[in-house]
Structure formats: structure tokens, C-alpha cells
Image: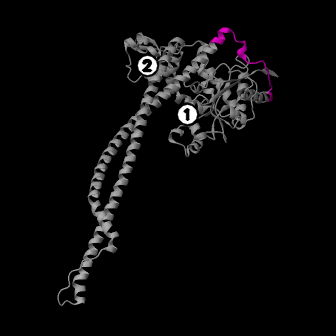
């Protein structure tokens, strides 16, 4: 039974590296297609899935300034918790478990079996990105997850991000300084991996981590590589933040313009309402004496003695009542009823305009507050953009210090996107079973390396530059049967606006694509 070590460590969480959005120096491009993707989800969508309902419950009854609008942004800009965590597991090293060897293939089988049961074994660690890399020196597993806890009884949300509480719910309580919940969990996962290794006749050789035996040069090299990865992740996050910030600024500027327009409209409506209210109040003031007089007369109506017309000579009582008394009372009754109706109507109209004025005044004040908030947010976002630009300048200076590796990675990122169709075809041709896939990968790798093994040079003649860019490493231009220019392949030569032949570009490729010189490849 062979003996092999187990490495379990926390990673920097470079999603672009895991997905191979760029190809580093230590990556064998001919084996990239062998990498296994178990899960690759958008982190923001995972946050919505896990925490949106909890955010809605938390915001009920809260003041606007205490509500959580975006939990992802809250965690990203906070200091207590990370957006996500990464762990890396590896069996052996590049000497005893190298990729492409039978031992390396065995390590792939063990890691693949280990990953199949990972999410069920760790339900509070939501895996959103997981890759098994076979294109580096030794097969290894990258697992990126969001730790969360449900049913939280303390203050705040009942479902939240928490590595410590997520691991506690799995039974890891922590202990001394170096015996944290995370270290306990990693050691437990190593034991699970060791059980799977034993079923494949591999014994766990516990000798500590391999980092302990690195010499000074390799240790510094490893640390420098970590720094570069961290900087790459930072620039990736900063780029996304800048794009999101610019979009937010545009939206806020539009909202600000709309708010200012609405504020002007409300101001005009308020002025018009003030004028109408003043007019109504003026009318009411004019009618107030009449109203007071009528109220007084109505209150004292029982005491009013009607002055009746004198009775005419020889006039009968019935004739006096019908011809003089009844018309007089009817006239008085109609006059008083008309005045009362008019008073009621004017009072209702005045109250209606008063309510309308109060509502318009309230809307105007709210819009003024919203406009001030929008202006403050715009100023804050402008300050954030300035800070991001300063950080971006610092990163460019770091690039000049660390060399052209990151520039090469950026150039080849575009090249890898252009090869996406070819890679998709290769994936469709790959067998479904893992053992058949490994055998097929070894055969393909031998075919790719045949040119180097045999020290062969292929001469390919074509008029189609789209074919030349994928086949040739060096390009020669012929005119009237003679070679007039020779140059290394450069991505800029195949741009849509590039001419078929230009003397300056082929004589000196660096003059045409100064920043892409690190992406050149030499042929056999």
C-alpha cells in the first residue's frame, strides 16, 4: 500500500484563476480541457437565494435608514465577515502524484469521490464554485462556499453569513489559539479524504504541510505568487465595482434630474395652491360677517318678533293670512335656506382646498428630502470613483514591479474566449465515464506534444488569416513568389481593422502591439 500526504488549506478565492479566465505560467494549456467543473454559479444570485427572505423579514417595521437594501454589498463593504471562503485539497505532491501519471489519475478518482458527498456532509457551507484542476503539476480541488446560519436568535437577520456559527452547527466548537473551528473542520475533512484513500489502497502519511520544507527561494516565490493572485482578485473586484458604480451614477443622475423636475412641478403646484387658498380665505373672510350674522339670527330666531304688515280696513283674517302672512314667511324661509346652503358649501370648499394644500406641501417636502439624498449619494459615488481610480493607478505601478505576467494573462484571456467554440467541441467529444475521459485525455495530450517530441516543423500555406491565427506560430508574407516579411504571431495582426500586410507591423511587431508582446508564441 502506497503512502501519500494530504494537504488541506485555505485559498485566496481567485474565481478567475479557478475558471481559467486567464492562463498562468504554471498551467499546461494542453490539459485545461481535463479540468472538472462541479459547480459554477453567480455569487450575487446565491446571496439572493440564501438571504432575500431574511432581509424582507428584517426590514418589516424598520426605519428607512436602518433597512438593508442589498445584503451582498453590506457584507462586501463590511469588516466582520468575508463574502465567501475557499479551501484547497491535494493528495501527495508533484513527485509522487504528478498530473498525467497513473498515480495522478488515481488522485483524481479519490478527489472526485470525495467531492460527490461534500455538500450533503456540509449543509451550512453553500458551494457555488468548485473545480478539480488537472492542468497543473499535481491534481487538486478548489472549493468556494458561502457559510451561513439559520434561526439566529440574536439581533439582526435570522439568516446571516457566519463562518464560525456555520461550523459550530456542524459540531466544531473550537478550542485553543490554533485549534479554531476552521482548523478542526479541515482536519475532519482530511480524515474523510483519508478513508476514501484507504479504499483505493493509499495510506495517509501525516508529516505536516509541505510548506515547512520549502527553501527560502521557493518560499518567497510562493508568497509572491499569492500576492499576485490577491492583486489580480482585487483588480477584478475593483473593475466590477467601477462598472457598477458608473451604472449607479448614471441611474442616480437620471433620478436626480427626474426628482428636480418633479420638485419644480410640485413647487409650481404649491404656488398655485397657495394662490387659490389665499383667494378662498379672502372670500371666506368676506363672507364671515354674513355667516356670523346668520348664525346669530338663527340662534336668536326664537326671540325674533316678526313685524307683520298692518291690517287693512275691512280686511278679513283669512284674506290677511293668505295674501300677506304666508308669502312673507315663504320669502323669509327661502332666503334663510339659501344663505345656510351657501355657507355650508363655502365651508366644505375651503376645507377641501386646505386638505389639498397640506397634501401638496407634504409631497413637496418629501421630494426636497429625496432630492437632497440623491445629491448626497451622487457626491459619495463620485468620491468612490476617485478612490477606485487611485487604487487602479497603484495596481498599474505594481504590475511594473511584478513584471509582465499579468499583462500576458489579460491578453490570453481574450484568446481563450476565441477558443471557446473549439473547447466546447472537445468537451462534447469527451467520454462520460471518468476512466474513459482520463484515457482519452492522455491520447490527446500525446497528439499535442508530438510536434515537440519529434522536433517537427509544419509549413502551412493559406490566404485565410482566420485559419492562420489558430495554426501558425510564425508568419511569413510572400509577394510575387518571394518572402518579403517574417514575424512572430501577434493577436493585433488579426484585428478587423488590421491590414493584410503592413511593413512596419511585420518588421517590428512590438511597434504595432506594444502591450501584447508577452503573448507571442514560438513555433517548432
Where residue 465 appears, as percent x and y from the top left, is 44, 22
Q: Nearer the viewer, residue 255 or 412?
A: 255
Q: Secondary structure at mark 2?
A: helix
Q: Position of residue 408 (x, y in %)?
A: 51, 17
Q: What residue is shown at x 60% (from left), y 32% (from top)? A: 429
Q: Is residue 204 magenta?
A: yes
Residue at position x 71%, y 33% in the image: 167
Asked if one can make out residue 24 in the rendered structure from this viewpoint, the answer is no
- Which of 99/237 is in front? 237
Location of the N terminus (image quadrant): top right
- Give yes or no for residue 380 being in the magenta stretch: no
24 is higher (above) or lower (below) than 253: above
Identify the residue at image location x=38%, y=11%: 504
Q: Please count the marks in the image.
A: 2
Q: Is residue 101 left or right of residue 62?
A: right
Instruction: Give the residues drawn in magenta, as a range.
Output: 198-220
Q: CA distance from mark 1 to mark 2?
A: 41 Å
Dividing the picture into quadrants, the one containing residue 224 is top right
Q: Which residue lies under the disc numbered 2?
A: 492
Q: Specify the quadrant that holds the C terminus.
A: top right
Task: Please say if 120 is above or below 195.
Answer: below
Image height check: is 280 above or below 510?
Answer: below
Image side of residue 369 versus residue 519, left or right? left
Where residue 332 sits: x, y (%)?
Answer: 26, 74
Mark number for residue 74? 1
In the image, which is nearer the foreground, mark 1 or mark 2? Answer: 1
Residue 105 falls in image quadrant: top right
Residue sitting at x 72%, y 31%: 114
Q: Is residue 65 above or below residue 86?
A: below
Q: Secondary structure at mark 1?
A: helix
Q: Nearer the viewer, residue 518 or 315?
A: 315
Amino acid at each position: 500500500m502506497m503512502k501519500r500526504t494530504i494537504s488541506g488549506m485555505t485559498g485566496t478565492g481567485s474565481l478567475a484563476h479557478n475558471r481559467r479566465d486567464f492562463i498562468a505560467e504554471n498551467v499546461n494549456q494542453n490539459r485545461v480541457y481535463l479540468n472538472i467543473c462541479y459547480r459554477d454559479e453567480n455569487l450575487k444570485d446565491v446571496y439572493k437565494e440564501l438571504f432575500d427572505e431574511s432581509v424582507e423579514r428584517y426590514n418589516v417595521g424598520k426605519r428607512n435608514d436602518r433597512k438593508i437594501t442589498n445584503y451582498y454589498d453590506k457584507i462586501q463593504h463590511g469588516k466582520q465577515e468575508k463574502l465567501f471562503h475557499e479551501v484547497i485539497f491535494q493528495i501527495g505532491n508533484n513527485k509522487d502524484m504528478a498530473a498525467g501519471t497513473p498515480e495522478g489519475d488515481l488522485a483524481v478518482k479519490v478527489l472526485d469521490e470525495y467531492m460527490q458527498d461534500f455538500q450533503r456532509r456540509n449543509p451550512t457551507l453553500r458551494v457555488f464554485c468548485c473545480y478539480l484542476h488537472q492542468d497543473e503539476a499535481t491534481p487538486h480541488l478548489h472549493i468556494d462556499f458561502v457559510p451561513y446560519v439559520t434561526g439566529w436568535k440574536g439581533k439582526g437577520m435570522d439568516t446571516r453569513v457566519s463562518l464560525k456559527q456555520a461550523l459550530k452547527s456542524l459540531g466544531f466548537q473550537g478550542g485553543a489559539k490554533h485549534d479554531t473551528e476552521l482548523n478542526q473542520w479541515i482536519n475532519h475533512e482530511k480524515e474523510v479524504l483519508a478513508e476514501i484513500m484507504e479504499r483505493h489502497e493509499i495510506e495517509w502519511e501525516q508529516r505536516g504541510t509541505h510548506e515547512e520544507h520549502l527553501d527560502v527561494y521557493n518560499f518567497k516565490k510562493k508568497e509572491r505568487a499569492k500576492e499576485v493572485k490577491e492583486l489580480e482578485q482585487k483588480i477584478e473586484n475593483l473593475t466590477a465595482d467601477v462598472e457598477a458604480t458608473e451604472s449607479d451614477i448614471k441611474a442616480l443622475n437620471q433620478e436626480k434630474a427626474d426628482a428636480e423636475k418633479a420638485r419644480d412641478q410640485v413647487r409650481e403646484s404649491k404656488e398655485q395652491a397657495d394662490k387659490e387658498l389665499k383667494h378662498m380665505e379672502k372670500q371666506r373672510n368676506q363672507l364671515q360677517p354674513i355667516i356670523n350674522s346668520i348664525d346669530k339670527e338663527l340662534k336668536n330666531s326664537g326671540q325674533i318678533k316678526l313685524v307683520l304688515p298692518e291690517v287693512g280696513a275691512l280686511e278679513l283674517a283669512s284674506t290677511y293670512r293668505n295674501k300677506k302672512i304666508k308669502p312673507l314667511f315663504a320669502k323669509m324661509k327661502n332666503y334663510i335656506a339659501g344663505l345656510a346652503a351657501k355657507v355650508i358649501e363655502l365651508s366644505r370648499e375651503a376645507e377641501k382646498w386646505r386638505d389639498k394644500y397640506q397634501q401638496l406641501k407634504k409631497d413637496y417636502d418629501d421630494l426636497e428630502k429625496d432630492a437632497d439624498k440623491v445629491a448626497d449619494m451622487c457626491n459619495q459615488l463620485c468620491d468612490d470613483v476617485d478612490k477606485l481610480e487611485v487604487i487602479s493607478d497603484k495596481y498599474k505601478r505594481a504590475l511594473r514591479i511584478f513584471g509582465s505576467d499579468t499583462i500576458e494573462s489579460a491578453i490570453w484571456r481574450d484568446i481563450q474566449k476565441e477558443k471557446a467554440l473549439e473547447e466546447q467541441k472537445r468537451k462534447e467529444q469527451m467520454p462520460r465515464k471518468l476512466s474513459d475521459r482520463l484515457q482519452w485525455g492522455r491520447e490527446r495530450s500525446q497528439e499535442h506534444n508530438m510536434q515537440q517530441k519529434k522536433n517537427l516543423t509544419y509549413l502551412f500555406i493559406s490566404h485565410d488569416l482566420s485559419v492562420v491565427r489558430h495554426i501558425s506560430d510564425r508568419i511569413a508574407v510572400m509577394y510575387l513568389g518571394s518572402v518579403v516579411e517574417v514575424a512572430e504571431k501577434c493577436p493585433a495582426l488579426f484585428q478587423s481593422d488590421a491590414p493584410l500586410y503592413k511593413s512596419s507591423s511585420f518588421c517590428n511587431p512590438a511597434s504595432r502591439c506594444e502591450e501584447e508582446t508577452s503573448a507571442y508564441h514560438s513555433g517548432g
